[in-house]
Amino acid sequence: MNARTKQLPKPPGKLKHALTFVIVLFLLWGSAVQTEASIGRLISGIPNMWDLLKEMFPPNWAYFDNIVNPMLDTIRMAIAGTTFGAVFAIPLSILAARNMVRSPWVYQIARFILNLLRTIPDLLLAAIFVAIFGLGLIPGILALAVFSVGLIAKLTYESLETIDRGPLEAMTSVGASKLQWIAFGVVPQILPHFISYVLYTFEINVRAAAVLGLVGAGGIGLYYEKTLGFLEYDKTNSIILLTLAVVLAIDYFSTKLREKLL
Amino acid sequence: MNRNRWLHWLIAIALVLIYVWTFWDIRFSGIKETAGKITRSIIQGIFSPDWDYVYLPDGEDLLRGLLDTLAIAALGTFISAVLCIPFAFWAAASRNKSKALSGAGKFVLSFIRTFPEIVMALLFIKAVGPGSFAGALALGLHSIGMLGKLFSEEVENMDAGPTEALIATGASRLQVLWFAVIPQVLPGFLSYTLYRFEINVRSATILGIIGAGGIGTPLIFALTTRHWDRVGIILLGIIVTVTLIDLISGYFRRKLA
Amino acid sequence: MIELRNVSKTYPNGTKGLSNINLTFEKGEFVVIVGLSGAGKSTLLRSINRLHEITEGEIRIDGKSITAAKGAELRRIRRDIGMVFQSFNLVKRSSVLRNVLAGRVGYHSGLRTLLGFPKADIHLALQALDRVNIAEKAYIRADQLSGGQQQRVAIARVLAQEAKIILADEPVASLDPLTTKQVMDDLKRINQELGITTIVNLHYIDLAREYATRIVGLRAGEVVFDGPVSEATDERFAEIYGRPIQEDELLGEKAL
């Protein structure tokens, strides 16, 4: 045993870690410079922020009457957008799953399209759709739909790739057509997950829909622009609080539903 | 068996009602006659974009805008990663903690997550003036909500064994944290931070709409002035940047797993 | 020396985990505790270093009461007690050496350990690894080792702790018969060469008889047997268990 204690192993090099650390630090410093970040400005600006916050309270309770309807519009927008997204996500997710299609071309292209759909943020999409379709709820619904297809399909195809092969093989062996194979082999397994993903996307879309109005896509976002423009911060606060209440309520029910599903 | 059927009918009726309500009142103001023409212009703009805009010697070009956007996302993500750690531990449920305490933490995180980034950006613009810094701060604060939630779940799912072992050797709370908790949760933390960075790059492109820096501002300007080729090049730039960042970030996240 | 005086543990719902235990363990003993699952073996062991709290009685380690100790004093006493777990409880992503060094934390202040361990500690840790014959794996990630190797790292951690007492809670339950023998041999050897008091919870009766000098039998939280191995016949075991011995309580000839 004594001869072996002489050959105690050497510690591994630390160079890679040190290099990574330095690079990350450099990138951060560069970011701070580029954004003209300065703690000084932040600290001196805090009184301004505090003033603004003070003006926001108490919220303008009377204003709630004005914004209830736009809020309902916002929820409608989210429901419609999510639904259209879900419908189109079904075929796309099947095409993007490795175990659903045989040719790699098909699922590579499908995944590429999905990635593309998720690249442009919803507010930008909404702005573009407003330019095309004009103001109103339609561009908002379209923007949310596009975003939803991307998200729902991604979550679904990842789930599809992990389903049990047993029922699928059974369907193939009884000579089912592709559609029947999907309907009886795939759908029963994936349905709870799919619905869960749709609900999750809906939660996100309600938050997103609340802001889309800033670019003219309807819903309660329009009122942010108005109230901030007129410096009526107590009304802005009302909008925030109402949005918060609605989102929390929807989140709560959605989460409960999702728990029941899985 | 009967009860299930009854429940299914109930859900079906509820869904029908919801959908009727949804589509009943949508003000279908009719698609503008110009819609088709504009769509064609935009598509044209994407396929023959304004390449000159990529680099202009006097600044205010695509590359600078994208760089700005990346910087906002990077700084914002860093701020949120650092600040969310205490929140994460606050919200994480554990055997030795009251449910009320971690419940409160979870609520605070939920509140932060719901507070729209745009509104936060507007608040910060009030504080530090318009520009990228306000955007970075807004992103940083808002991201605490999501990152804090993911981090706290990581802490909750952590294996309690090493913690027990370390307590048995007579370690202090700090030492237990450093030797048992952090080595277990660190890879997850880093992975979630990178994931949040990917999302923040997308969010940073929007902030320009309200003047908080990034490529959003030139994009809106190009849209309203109907410079479709410029719209095209900016969109292309965004798509390329986001895709690249996703690829690089995805590579590092796989290495961490 | 470990003394348990009138130790009882009653759970909030009324169940008695431990019932009026009076035991004394002398320095250098190798004791095996046996009993059915749920008899209180784990509770007993974990009470000694206060990972579990008792509701009545007192436990003294080398004359100092651990039940009354608090804060730094409690940590000080724990430092002298090493524990080996059934699931090893190593930090999977850390290197073997780092896991062993975790045994040294009781000897330094919190801040100091954040900065790094002194050379002397690293040397000690490497020697501990050598004692269980896996020094060459020092810089490898812990989860890349086999179960038996991980348990040996856990034992090395206890050695690095320079503990005077080793508590082993079903240390071999997750291991195959051959590795079981290796780990039990290691524990026995450390007990004899270094004189460390060793208390082991075991599930296998033949293993208990092979390695212990003294056997303590627990049943429903009470001590029903306490004596040398020679007295632990199959009939006495049947009394401890309240029923005849079963097949799965014997490790089998192939290992022994």
Image: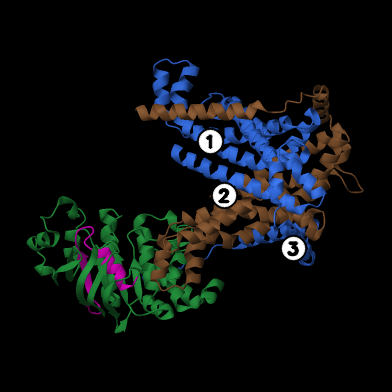
Chain colours: A blue, B brown, C green
Name the residue furthest front: A62
Q: Secondary structure at mark 2?
A: helix
How crowded pointer 3 is (Cα within 10 Å; few <14, some 14-19, many 20+) is rated as some
Instruction: Tell me what residue is drawn at x 32 percent, y 77 percent.
Output: C67
Q: Residues within 10 Å of mark 1 (few under 14, many from 20)?
A: some
**Quick one: C144 or C135, which is closer to the camera?**
C144
Q: Which residue is mark 2?
A: B255
Mark closer to the chain start, 1 or 3: 3
Task: Find out whether residue C32 is within the magenta segment.
Answer: yes
B112 with respect to B180 (left or right)? right
The magenta stretch spans residue A236: no
Identify which amino acid the numbered label 3 is placed on: Trp
Give the structural element (helix, strand or loop) at label 1: helix
Residue B143 coordinates in the image, percent (x, y): 65, 53
Task: Give me the residue at 46% from left, 29% from top.
Answer: B10
Label 2, label 1: how many angstroms apart (C-alpha)? 20 Å
Numbered mark located on residue A158 in the image: 1
Q: Nearer the viewer, mark 2 or mark 1?
A: 1
